[in-house]
């Protein structure tokens, strides 16, 4: 038994002698471990799709702005993404979650305006949780596009964060409103357009209205500006000067709109928004009403026509409406109203002028009477002084001649 035990111990020793040392084995394991540079620490849509096991190709078609469809440029970009990242979690996309529920969803190209397409990488970084603690990169330049992408791909948390940013950013620095307006106009973001209208309504009705806004503004946006201004001014809309300026801006915006319907035109030219009209704006709005409004009665003035008549007849002396082309295209009702009101204004002006002349003459006569009275008083005083001087000389002569004795 001892012999057998001894043989077993000898065999075990020989096996250990033939094997690598324990420390050597451990060293071999360390040598085979990949370096940190070779280790993927976080899933990223930028990785090689084979190495990251990407299971969906998101194809985005970037469409640049152009005057017509033929002039627009398109650029294709492919993003190798992961279904589980896009469709699961607090930052998930409901759009992709519904799409991936299909048995074999086919990748469908998605066309986006270039402004939004350029921000897709920021949205993907946000969903993937990349870029550390500040993945969204919200700025005045990116907020509108990211809000738009959140709406398109139904990323509710992205919509919420982007909306909170642009609302606060507009209030804190309203000078950014031109950027927000331009981006919202390009992307069709009605909530941002409404916010811009609310923040800048009063400023947009001043003389410093930016030309860029005038070039881009449509009647719908301008109606919001007018409505907000009326609401926030407690029903007291604006002074005559601002009303005249607002009518000029309204006429410019309406004249550029080719698809304006009757209801919108009647709303935007309502008397509560444009109580007084600039004469040139009145001409433009009259001509537009002839084309757009079909429901007006031929024998009765509309509200806009009535205000236009007042504006044009107020300027009758300047000949604002007397061009032959303008008169030829007006209806008999408007021509009759123009002539009647102009004659009435001329007659009133003449009466006022005569009254002023009479008042001036009366005032002049009254002043003349006062001056004559003062002159008579002055003459009386002068006569008294002359009598007193004459009497004084007579007394002095008598004293000199000894006719009278001086008082002791």
Image (cartoon, helix red, strand yellow):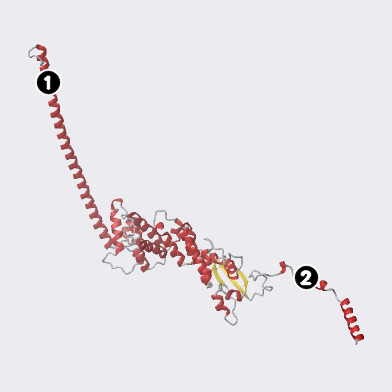
Where is residue 129, by image quadrant?
A: bottom right
Left or right: 239 in relation to 21 = left
Q: Residue at x 28, y 55 (%)?
A: 313
Q: For the residue labelled by badge 1, is the local secondary structure a helix, a strand or a loop?
A: helix
Q: Position of residue 51 (x, y in %)?
A: 69, 73
Numbered badge on residue 30: 2
- Against 250, is 100 above or below? below
- Image quarter hosting the N terminus: bottom right
Which residue is farthest top? Answer: 401
The C terminus lies in which quarter of the figure?
A: top left
Q: Report the residue marked by disc 1.
A: 390
| Residue 174 % position (x, y) | 46, 58
| Cβ atoms under marks 2 and 1 closer than 8 Å | no
Which residue is located at x 91 percent, y 85 percent?
2
Q: Classify 370 as above or below 203.
A: above
Q: CA distance from mark 2 to mark 1?
A: 143 Å
In x, y percent, where is residue 201?
40, 60
Lateral position of residue 175 relative to residue 237, left or right: right
Which of the two residues, 251 or 398, is positioned nearer the viewer here? 398
Q: Secondary structure at mark 2?
A: helix
User: Reading the chain from its start, which is encountered first: label 2 or label 1?
Assistant: 2
- Front residue of 43 and 68: 43
Determine if residue 69 is in view.
no
In the foreground, 294 or 203 = 203
Question: Which one is in front, 205 or 266?
Answer: 205
């Amino acid at each position: 038994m001892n012999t057998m035990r001894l043989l077993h111990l000898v065999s075990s020793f020989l096996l250990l002698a033939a094997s690598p040392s324990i420390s050597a084995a451990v060293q071999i394991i360390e040598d085979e471990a990949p370096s940190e540079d070779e280790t993927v620490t976080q899933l990223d849509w930028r990785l090689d799709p084979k190495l990251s096991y990407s299971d969906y190709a998101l194809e985005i078609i970037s469409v640049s702005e152009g005057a017509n469809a033929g002039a627009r440029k398109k650029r294709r970009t492919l993003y190798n993404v992961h279904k589980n990242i896009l469709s699961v979690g607090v930052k998930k996309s409901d759009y992709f979650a519904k799409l991936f529920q299909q048995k074999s969803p086919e990748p469908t190209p998605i066309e986006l305006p270039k402004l939004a397409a350029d921000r897709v990488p920021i949205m993907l970084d946000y969903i993937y949780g990349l870029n550390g603690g500040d993945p969204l990169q919200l700025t005045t330049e990116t907020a509108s596009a990211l809000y738009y992408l959140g709406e398109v791909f139904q990323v509710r948390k992205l919509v919420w964060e982007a909306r909170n940013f642009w609302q606060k950013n507009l209030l804190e620095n309203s000078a950014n409103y031109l950027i927000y307006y331009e981006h919202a106009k390009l992307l069709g973001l009605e909530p941002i357009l409404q916010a811009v209208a609310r923040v800048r309504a009063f400023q947009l009705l001043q003389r410093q209205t930016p030309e860029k806004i005038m070039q881009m503004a449509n009647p719908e946006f301008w109606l919001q500006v007018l409505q907000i201004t009326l609401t926030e001014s407690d029903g007291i809309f604006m002074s005559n000067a601002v009303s005249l300026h607002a009518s000029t801006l309204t006429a410019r915006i309406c004249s550029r709109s080719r698809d304006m319907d009757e209801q919108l035109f009647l709303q935007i030219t309502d008397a509560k928004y444009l109580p007084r009209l600039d004469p040139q704006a009145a001409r433009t709005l009259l001509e537009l009403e002839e084309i757009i409004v079909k429901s007006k009665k031929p024998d009765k003035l509309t509200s806009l026509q009535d205000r236009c008549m007042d504006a044009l007849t107020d300027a009758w002396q300047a000949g604002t409406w007397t061009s032959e082309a303008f008169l030829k295209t007006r209806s008999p009702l408007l021509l009759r109203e123009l002539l009647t009101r102009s004659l009435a204004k001329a007659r009133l002006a003449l009466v006022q002028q005569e009254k002023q002349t009479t008042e001036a003459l009366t005032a002049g006569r009254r002043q003349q009477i006062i001056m004559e009275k003062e002159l008579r008083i002055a003459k009386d005083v002068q006569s008294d002084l002359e009598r007193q001087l004459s009497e004084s000389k007579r007394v002095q002569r008598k004293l000199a001649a000894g006719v009278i004795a001086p008082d002791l």
